[in-house]
Image (cartoon, grey):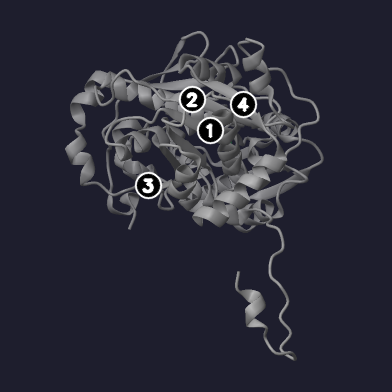
Amino acid sequence: MTYADNTRGELPSFVSHLECSRSGERYPAGELHNLSDGGFPLLVRYDLDRLGAAVDKQALLERTSDLWRYREFLPVTRAENIVSLGEVTTPLISLSRIAASRGANRIDVKDEGRLPTGSFKARGVAVALSMAKELGVRSVAMPTNGNAGAALSAYASRAGMKSYVFCPGDTPEINIAETGIQGAEVFRVNGLINDCGKIVGEGKAPTGWFDFSTLKEPYRIEGKKTMGLELAEQLGWSVPDVIFYPTGGGTGLIGMWKAFAELEHIGWLGKKRPRMVAVQAEGCAPIVKAFEEGRETAELWENAHTVAAGIRVPVAIGDFLILQAVRESDGFAITVSDEAIEAGRTEVAGQEGLLLCPEGAATYAAYLKSLDEGRVSADDHAVLFNCATGLKYPLPRYGAELNLAQPVDFASMVR
Ligand SMILES: *Cc1c(COP(=O)(O)O)cnc(C)c1O
């Protein structure tokens, strides 16, 4: 049973208002919102003094091990509105053999592939769709590179809502199929995710659907924020030295940064922050380019391509928030090649038994590159985010042929 199955009625709620992430302008909670009037993402603000007084770490330990254990930090006000498929706490898996062979202190992978629909998109969508239900939304639409659409489809069906998902035509087939079978109307668009986003925006008036695009509604960040809450709790209310995050729209990076600030405000974390490293692919690196050029916002990346579909995002509406978090944390932004992504996936799977998704493998490749370049130290405790199960992605063909008509040559098998 999930938390939602066992609970009814009012939840402890500490949301004070929503705030434009650019101007600081305030908007009332309890109403549907997309972007601020200025066209920027809205952030959910809480009465943190009251929140801090209402939760204690000891009581948390007795709760179900899912993201709703952090309900005081979340915006949903009534339990019946929670739409859940069992958003489990994801494990930290240490790459101890690899760390030992590279002389590194500690490398952990936060394995988000264990979540419903096989990716961390479930965190954001679970919270945002619960809020949509609370605020009376009946149908939702979203552009996606795959995993977000799959999560939206699943949670919308669970909530009894209609969903519409638009993805680039070359989105991995498994994502299109899972999205379709879970109930969404799914469309293949001969363009990139920003082209799909345009369709969703233009469709709002004629269809009445609610625009669920990344950061265009305030609550997916809150769901993704639970990665930061969870990580800090798993580390005994402390943070690692450095976090490598595969950055597309940046929701997770922005969300974790917000989580750490909220935890510091209520006294559960000290001043120390992890250095936040935004990882992108060489073939689509608008944030890295902006970081290196010292800009506050990023430019559209032309001809975006990479095997890591989840980070093929040529333009991110939260670019300035990603760049702010990276800089405030004394972190950096870095690219990796598709070859390094593939090699990283093979190495971690073969040596540690952990099959990463290409985006997760990108964080591993970025970690190695950063270590080589001296941008992180072997003494650092590094956390890499594996955002989806590796099983959702095409894999190379393995398996030598054995012919039953001939004797089996065991000697040649053993290596
Ligand atoms: C969506 C996605 C990302 C990027 O996440 P953001 O928080 O939007 O930057 C990375 N990896 C995978 C597998 C994804 O599905």
User: Is the Cβ of the residue at disc 4 closer than 8 Å to that at disc 1?
Assistant: no
- Contact? badges 3 and 4 (CB < 8 Å): no
Q: CA distance from mark 4 to mark 1?
A: 10 Å
Q: Quick one: label 2 or label 1, which is nearer the N terminus?
A: 1
* Residue underneath mark 4: 334
The reply, left or right, for residue 279 in relation to residue 218 is right
- Measuring 71% from the left and 35% from the top, which residue is drawn there? 193
* Amino acid type, mark 2: Met
| Label 2 residue SS | strand
Label 3, secondary structure: give it: loop
Q: CA distance from mark 2 to mark 3?
A: 21 Å
* SS at badge 4: strand
Q: Earlier in the sequence, mark 2 or mark 4?
A: 2
Q: Is residue 158 in view from this perspective?
A: yes
* Mark whose residue sits in front, 3 or 4: 4
Q: Are marks 2 and 3 in contact (CB under 8 Å)?
A: no
Q: Is residue 162 above or below residue 337?
A: below
Q: Circle 1 sits on which residue?
A: 245
Could you tell me how far apart the alpha carbons at marks 2 and 4 are, in whole angstroms?
Answer: 11 Å
